Image: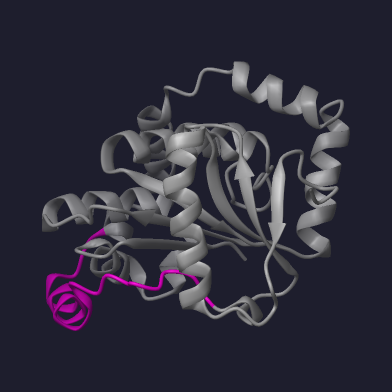
Amino acid sequence: MNKVFECDAQKLDAGMTGTEVTQIYQEAYNDGKENGYTPVIVFLDDTLEDHINFVFEEGGGSAAYTNSILKSNHSNGKELFEERYAEFEGSYGSEFLAVDDENLDILISMNSGDSKSDFFPAINAHEGEAYLVKVPTERPYEIFAWIPFGGWNECPDSETMIAMCKYWYDEYGAVPTMITRDTLSFYLNKPISDEDTAINIAKEQCVFCCDILGMGGIEAYVAMTLNGNVWSFWWD
């Protein structure tokens, strides 16, 4: 067990390829279904470690923090997305998240159907040591009660993160799979195949992480979501 994580954490070899990381995650995911845990790949560098330790300290220790988070009501994810969208629209106007149909068609023709069989990067693609963390919950969205993430810049804090991720999990089966100091990735076993649904999800993704608008605009996230099995976010 790594001293940062209050649960089983297996350090991954620095030379592992994306294929190898994906395989070890999938094996753990299937095992977790039977044994009551949720795996997540965490790239732990000094920045993320300091953040986790700070949050635990402020929360009275890791156990107190986790228990406090889990006691909260996280059933308001949809409402939180709606509130954020209204705030976003009030600040920037409804046109800011309007979809350019011509641009979208081009991106979909390039990316639609691009489900990834290897949905993790090689270990050397990110800074820090990589761990397969087995979080003791059968609810994937609750991993943030054990691994604090967010609450800085425009990134949602752990309470908000859990509620939003619960909504995505309940509605679309999106499972948080990878955490780094400033990125978060999800995996979908059953990708979204309806374009209108993908557009609505992309709008949610943009208010969840407004920095992604600088990474190709909303159309890029519609194309990523449509028939794709990986959602990726990055906060500056």
Q: Is residue 62 above or below residue 232?
A: above
**215 vs 162, nearest the viewer:** 162
Residue 12 showing in the rendered view:
yes
* Spot occupied by residue 59 in the image (x, y as percentages of width and height): 81, 28
* Spot occupied by residue 164 in the image (x, y as percentages of width and height): 44, 37
* Spot occupied by residue 199 in the image (x, y as percentages of width and height): 21, 56
Residue 164 showing in the rendered view:
no
Highlighted magenta segment, given as a residue range = 98-121
* Side of 164 where 190 appears, left or right: left
**72 vs 146, nearest the viewer:** 146
**212 vs 189, nearest the viewer:** 189
Q: Give the quadrant of the C terminus.
A: bottom right
Whether the magenta-drawn stretch holds residue 99 is answered as yes
Q: Tell me which residue sits at (64%, 50%) in the image.
A: 133
Q: Is residue 17 above or below residue 217?
A: below
Q: Is residue 11 above or below residue 147?
A: below
Q: Tell me which residue sits at (59%, 31%) in the image.
A: 159
Using the rendered view, name the quadrant where residue 10 is placed: bottom right
